[in-house]
Amino acid sequence: MHPISTTKSAPRHQQGIALFVVIVFVMLSMLLALWASRTAIFNEMIVGNDADYQRAFEAAQSLIQDAEMDIQLTSEPGHRASKAELPLETSEIGNILNDLNVFPFCKDGLCVKRRGKQDFWNNTADADADAANNFETSLNQLAAADVGARYGEFTGASFEVTSDDEEETPRNAILADRSAANRGGWYWIEVLKYADSSGGSSLIVDDSPTAQPPDLLDLKLNPSVVYRITALAYGLKPSTLAVIQETYARTRLQD
């Protein structure tokens, strides 16, 4: 009988391919997780910024309404007592505009027609020494006590509500914040003089040939002025700012 011979094969050396594949998959998983987290944070920032802007925009709308009420209350006794007044009659316009025409051209929320840059809210730096001659004002100069007007300052409107436990809480946190000039909101009313003839001018409602005579709506501007209102509100975030402008004409009611 022939003896059975056995031979031992040499051990195979590990090449590390499986480990390399695992490391690659782990790194890819980490990159995917990092990308997903960054995307979530970015989306959260967008949603947060948009929500903060909407809050500031709503506060600016409230300031617009408060400025309109300020104009409507002009003839009320004691309104704006010891403060700059809105004109009641055409004859008062000149004196009031002369009183306001002192740099920075606004007083107690009333202003002459702006002659410098219209978007003053984008000018956050202090004006130069000759700014009065150039009619340039900065936001820092206009957003100040006795220059701009706060919500409810001349209308008595309240931004607080009383809860069941009789504690007052802010209805609007933005309007309630008056801790600094760059917090909360402000409004300014520009008094824009019209020609005296504008008080008797009319808007054509129906000028069709069959209308005898044409149906006309009397503007009844007395005094002959319209108002341009600028309302500005800061958000809860330092970078949020909402600005609204409108032109408002106060007409006299028919007797």
Image: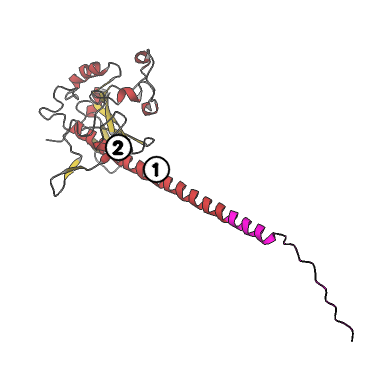
Residue 214 visible in the displayed image: no
User: Mark on residue 49?
Assistant: 1
| Residue 146 drawn in magenta | no
Going by the numbered disc 1, the residue's amino acid type is Asn
The region drawn magenta spans: 1-28
Colour scheme of the rendered structure: secondary structure
Q: Name the residue under label 2.
A: 60
**In the rendered image of this protein, does residue 11 appear above or below residue 202?**
below
Where does residue 31 sit, x and y in percent of width and height?
A: 56, 52
Residue 145: x %, y % from top left: 24, 24
Q: Earlier in the sequence, mark 2 or mark 1?
A: 1
Q: Is residue 25 magenta?
A: yes
Q: Which residue lies furthest to the left in this view?
A: 77
Locate the C terminus by quadrant: top left
Q: In the depicted view, which residue is nearer to us: 210 or 74?
A: 74
Callout 2: few (<14), some (14-19), or many (20+) C-alpha neighbours within 10 Å? many
Q: Which tag is nearer the camera, tag 2 or tag 1?
A: 1
10 Å crowding of disc 1: few (<14), some (14-19), many (20+): some
